[in-house]
Image: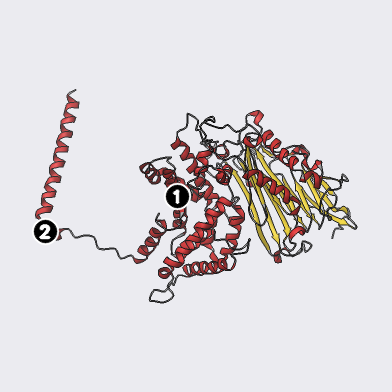
Amino acid sequence: MPVRSPFESSIAKPGQGKVVLSLLPPANPSLSTLTYKYPLKLLTRTPGFVPQSASPSASQPVHLYLLTYGGGLLPGDQIDVSITLEPRTRLVVTTPQGSTKIFKTETSPGRTLSDQSRQTLDVRIGQEAALCYLPDPSAPFKDSRYEQIQTFTVDNIAKGSCRSSLCVLDWVTQGRSSRGENWDFNLWKGKNEIWLLDEPTSSENNEKKEKKKLLLRDSLILNDETSASPQAGNNPPRSLIRERTSPHGVIGTLILYGPVFEKLSSFFVEKFTSLPRIGARNWSSSAPAAAEAPQNYDSRVTFTAAHVRAGCVLVKFGAADFETAKDWLGGILREEGSIAREFGEEALLCL
Amino acid sequence: MTADHETYSLQKEVLDLEVRLQNAKARLGQVSTPHSEPEPPLPSDIPFITTSHALLLLSDSALPLGSFAYSSGLESYVAHNKPLPLTTTPVASFHRFLRLSLASMGSLSLPYVLAAYRDPTDLETLDNDLDASTPCPVAQRASIAQGRALLGVWERAFRSTYAPRSGDYVVTDPREQSGIKAVADFSEALKCSMDDVLGAKGHFAPLWGAVCLAMGLDARQTAYVFMINHAKAVLSAAVRASVMGPYQAQSVLASKDLQDMITERIDRDWHTSVEDAGQVVPPLDLWVGRHELLYSRIFNS
């Protein structure tokens, strides 16, 4: 029987990463686990930012940078990150390499599903802990295939201000617009789920017994529906995804949950409900026939924001291009100020 | 030249003979006794009649679900795409919407219909998961209102026939029994969770699957009627929103294109699990969500 090396990594598969953030007394955030394997790279930093928060339990946020070699994913690459936030910790996750590039999948006859790139993120957030995940968008290149599943599990026992908090941004662009790409990929699937867990997050190994309830599922499937057809000879129309996303060049979702983001949630909902009515007219005879709305970001970005379930706020937006969406979102988050106050200006790195 | 003329005269003669033959046949029919050609016997295929009857009830546009109050985003779509570019006609723009709407219905709701039909025991989880997957209050309200209406129609009207408490007719099919029980259990859960924000809601898609099961429809019919009812609701909204006229709407409804489109969507999502159900038309969420922003509205969604 071979002797196992004591230095052997506990992570067996390439692309896997594991992070556990705990709080040492009195209030020192510390990474009790941090492992990763090629092509994934995880870097962390504690900037020493003290949250100017009303909540007395707020601890210093730790930054986690998600990196991949080459700044993108090749066909067959699988990234699998699991993060645990123990109670009262705060984590900021960003992607400092710019948009996640999804490279082309070769169209050979023997193509299998494993040729697509895949990314899973599984985050468990304890009581009073908060996650701020504002990454760059995903940029699927022509002919690429990609799937991502992001699961966030929050503690359902805690109520009121002891609840977990999370802010998750997920957006996808039309590809390399400078090269004329306009939703030319084969498949992009993105799923975000929030689960309510009725047992303490510390019980890790008996996952079968845990009682979970789905709080939110936001699933987007952009599929050109060509792979299913057996006749590879005739070229099917490649404009299906474009037709379904038109007139937008970038599509995104922002999910807000928990006490830390309560103000930001209300701010978004308020902004949405106070938008000018569509098709409104000024009926007074002296006014010009059609009152033109001033051109600002709110009119260039089509968005909705609404309370969906149990205090969850879902913001969905679409814009003509990445820059417009980025300026709009960054503008709102900076104007409201919660993120900068609670996590520091650096959390808005990607915006 | 002569050959052409000859063909023409021969064709004329054939036509003339055909007309004479028909006339002779008609006269023979009048003079001969009516029993000379017996009518085919009345078909007595009872199970076929029963399922067709249920099918006709559920596909009836007079089924009181209140579907006429919802345009499924059409009204908002029209407002968001105004004015149309000169190259696009309103009807072409509507066809695009119908295509997108059916695709979205197939990918997002149809898996829940089929899941509830195939295993109705966990209707409550399906209801919760669909509620969690519905991104905006406008769509949630529309789905819940129609789902509860369907539950009401089942309990007040259909149940006495399809699941009688007493009488000669007893439901023997175990699948139908499971559907009936699931709807009854769900209705009970719905009454108990009126004030629970995360309790049972009564979404339309899973209830449709369970009610169709209880009434003995097969899976294919359940899916097809679900999709065509959606198409009917959108087309009816289009008529009332002055996008097209009623005859034009009926011709779209009857068209081979629509039939093919529905079949294609059902085939594509026949095996999609509810975990993989998702939105394929992201702007649709925006249009439906922004329905609340319209200055004037004639629909609830």
Left or right placement of residue B257 versus residue A221 in this view: left
Residue pictured at 73% horizontal, 57% vertical:
A154
> A17 or B224: which is nearer to us?
B224
Left or right placement of residue A233 versus residue A74 in this view: left
Nearer the observer, disc 1 or disc 2?
Answer: 1
Residue pictured at 71% horizontal, 44% vertical:
A77
> A334 or B47: which is nearer to us?
A334
- Asked whether the residues under the numbered discs 1 and 2 touch, taking CB atoms below 8 Å apart as contact, a structural biologist would say no
Chain at numbered mark 2: B
Q: Position of residue A143 (x, y in %)?
A: 62, 37
Question: How many numbered discs, if any?
Answer: 2
Numbered label attached to residue B33 = 2
Camera sees residue B280 = no
Mark 2 surroundings: few (<14), some (14-19) or many (≥20) residues within 10 A: few
The amino acid type of the residue labelled 1 equals Ala
Numbered label attached to residue B233 = 1
> B97 or B263: which is nearer to us?
B97
Q: From the image, which quarter does the N terminus of chain B lie in?
A: top left
Left or right placement of residue B47 versus residue B128 in this view: left
Left or right placement of residue B30 versus residue B119 in this view: left
Secondary structure found at label 1: helix
Image quadrant in which you'd find residue B197 = bottom right
Q: Position of residue B201 (x, y in %)?
A: 57, 61
Secondary structure found at label 2: loop
Chain at numbered mark 1: B
Q: Sequence order check: which comes first, mark 1 or mark 2?
A: 2
Image quadrant in which you'd find residue A135 = top right
Marks 1 and 2 sit apart, C-alpha to C-alpha, by: 50 Å
Q: Is residue B3 above or below residue A241?
A: above
Q: Position of residue A141 (x, y in %)?
A: 66, 36
